Amino acid sequence: LFKGLVGGKTLTLDDMAPSLEKLKDHLIGKNVASDVAGKICDSVGAKLNGKVLGTFQTVSSTVKAALEESLLTLLRPRRQVDVLREALEAKRQGRPFIVTFCGVNGVGKSTNLAKICFWLIENDMRVLIAACDTFRAGAVEQLRTHVRHLNALHPPKNGKAFVELYEKGYGKDAAGVAAEAISFAKDSRQDIVLVDTAGRMQDNAPLMRSLAKLIRVNNPDLVLFVGEALVGNEAVDQLVKFNTNLADFSDESNPHLIDGIVLTKFDTIDDKVGAAVSMAYITGQPIVFVGTGQTYTDLRSLDSEAVVSALMN
Amino acid sequence: MVLAELGRKITTALRSLNNATVINEEVLNAMLKEICSALLEADVNVRLVKKLRENVRGAIDFDEMAAGVNKRRMIQTTVFQELVKLVDPGVKAYQPVKAKPNVIMFVGLQGSGKTTTCTKLAYHYMKKGWKTCLVCADTFRAGAYDQLKQNATKARIPFYGSYTEIDPVIIAQDGVEMFRKENFEIIIVDTSGRHKQEDSLFEEMLQVSNAVDPDNIIFVMDATIGQACESQARAFKEKVDVGSVIITKLDGHAKGGGALSAVAATQSPVIFIGTGEHIDDLEPFKTKPFISKLLGMGDIEGLVEK
Ligand SMILES: Nc1nc2c(ncn2[C@@H]2O[C@H](COP(=O)(O)OP(=O)(O)OP(=O)(O)O)[C@@H](O)[C@H]2O)c(=O)[nH]1
Ligand SMILES: Nc1nc2c(ncn2[C@@H]2O[C@H](COP(=O)(O)OP(=O)(O)OP(=O)(O)O)[C@@H](O)[C@H]2O)c(=O)[nH]1
Ligand SMILES: [Mg+2]
Ligand SMILES: [Mg+2]
């Protein structure tokens, strides 16, 4: 009847190894990066090592509960990024709040920038979108289309459009376009500047250098890394290298690194939600927004409990 | 892709057999563990990895094995054959035929690189002397037509699309019909990004496919994708007749093992890989040479024929 139940026993790493191994594989199956899954399970083992099991607890249920707890702690933001509040604070100081979006190619930077813009104007903010992807074909027209749609949804109040586009076409230096956009926003008293940037591979040194320059020159309030929930083990390398490149190419003692994450395409992955864990683990930064579709209202905040329960089942 | 690093890990694991004094269950399991974790780190689908492990375990029975059988060789051959299965669906890719219209439709998840790769592929054929054109049947993504138009214009490839028509089925049909009449040989149809969770998008894909009756449907997959690839790829295949795969964004650090699961899921070969954002960053992909390169060992390649 009590088979498998061990009471009053001291847990050792050897006891836990099979359970931890199984949970690690389970996490990998849920699309947590292998390396991250391994480290999380190791830390659970280390935490439980030497603890005494309760009378009716099994090794596997104890390990599982501890893992669940660790995952929750990991995903619950230690630091809240409250864009609206911070933007209002900047406004009181008489300057626009500046947000830069960056990430690898095709993850959803421009689309989620547009969704965030929609949310901001719903909150009565006036937004300038800076078209600093001056490379990819159609990037400027993509933003122009969004601006047109957004203004149609929110007709101008007091004769002033809620959102405007600042663009200088293609081929220009992105840092320069951003600088011009920011000074334009100051002059025209806009509340927020959303800076769209071109997608780039984390290994592409010239492109990473130019992103670091854009951030160094323009000193945004918030640097958001956009990553898609579809990404596998690459999540780790992307985030590590974006941060190291921002540090290495910034020649400042206190470089501006990634402040937060936008996790996109969350609607395409069913229960394979592991990328959220990989990203949070690597950066230690909060997942500020979650993209859940292709329309303006498909923007959420992270539901840590739901993510953990999808991970564990 | 998956290659260099993974190949190195696998060969090291296989070589561990050579160093072992006796080949037994334990040695085999240790080697399999190493290979499987290398595959998982490269994003290869967990189910495929598990199957690989089981198949190798099933093929090697130490008790039954006759004395004198070269166990090392047998294990290496089995592992190799299983790896081959990952990349080789065993079917030939569609080959366009000269002097007739070949309609090629692109499908895939959002942002995987369809539009960029459409122009790359058109350019590839154009350079080889084919009469090539592009049709933009993406009316959903903001700026999609501008994107294709700018790419096509730069490459001097004729294109068709519309700023006013909102039905991609109509655009696809009209564009393909027009280019068929004008005797184009390679007619490439770009479509919107979509995912299996949204039925209406999948239904639209089927309608576009029915309207243009493509000779080949190419599923475009991003090399950075993880474990979600397999079920998406399978869903695409169930809806339309995917015949080939292109893996994009292999110019970065990504190993592309997740995208490879699209091969098994669609039973379709990889025909090209994308290695950058520029129009000529496209490389033909040949399964067999890829495999022999995979392990970087000429003598291993001989094993597969046996
Ligand atoms: N299903 C789904 N699709 C999304 C989501 N966010 C963005 N997309 C789609 O992903 C595709 C790429 O989005 P973009 O915003 O152009 O991506 P990007 O990162 O700006 O791309 P580049 O600028 O080319 O690097 C588009 O088809 C978007 O509609 C999301 O949350 N869910
Ligand atoms: N580095 C790199 N970037 C690529 C490659 N192929 C495409 N891209 C980039 O990936 C991003 C998305 O490419 P698109 O061609 O717009 O993707 P799509 O599948 O048409 O996107 P949707 O139509 O929104 O579904 C763009 O920034 C492209 O420049 C590649 O092989 N390497
Ligand atoms: Mg963009
Ligand atoms: Mg496209």
Image (tube, coloured by chain):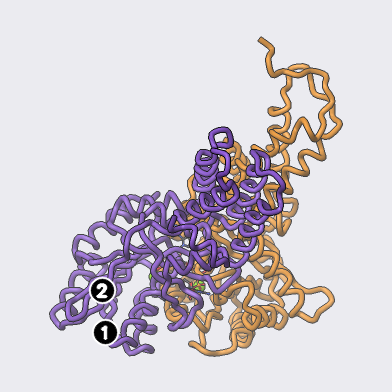
Q: Left of B174 or right of it: where is B257?
A: right
Label 2 or label 1, whichever comes before in sequence order: 2
Q: Is residue A143 above or below residue A177?
A: above
The percent coordinates of residue A294 (x first, y second) are 43, 60
Q: Nearer the viewer, residue A173 or B266?
A: B266
Q: Nearer the viewer, residue B21 or B39?
A: B21
Q: Are marks 2 and 1 on the same chain?
A: yes
Q: Chain of mark 2?
A: B
| Residue B27 falls in image quadrant | top right
Residue ranking furthest to the left: B181
The percent coordinates of residue A125 (x first, y second) are 57, 67
Q: Is residue A18 above or below residue A31?
A: above
The residues tagged by marks 2 and 1 sit, at their Cα atoms, a distance apart of 10 Å
Residue B130, numbered circle: 1
Q: Nearer the viewer, residue B101 or B155?
A: B101
State the residue at coordinates (27%, 82%): B132
Q: Is residue A271 something that shows in the picture?
A: no
| Residue A104 falls in image quadrant | bottom right
Q: Give the quadrant of the C terminus of chain B.
A: bottom left
| Residue A207 falls in image quadrant | bottom right
Residue ranking furthest to the front: B68
Amino acid carrying mark 2 in the image: Pro
Amino acid carrying mark 1 in the image: Trp
Apparent colour of chain A = orange
> What residue does disc 2 label?
B96
Q: Are the two marked residues, 2 and 1, in contact with CB atoms closer than 8 angstroms?
A: yes
Q: Chain of mark 1?
A: B
Among the chains pictured, the one given purple colouring is B
State the residue at coordinates (43%, 83%): B279
Q: Residues within 10 Å of mark 1 (few under 14, many from 20)?
A: some
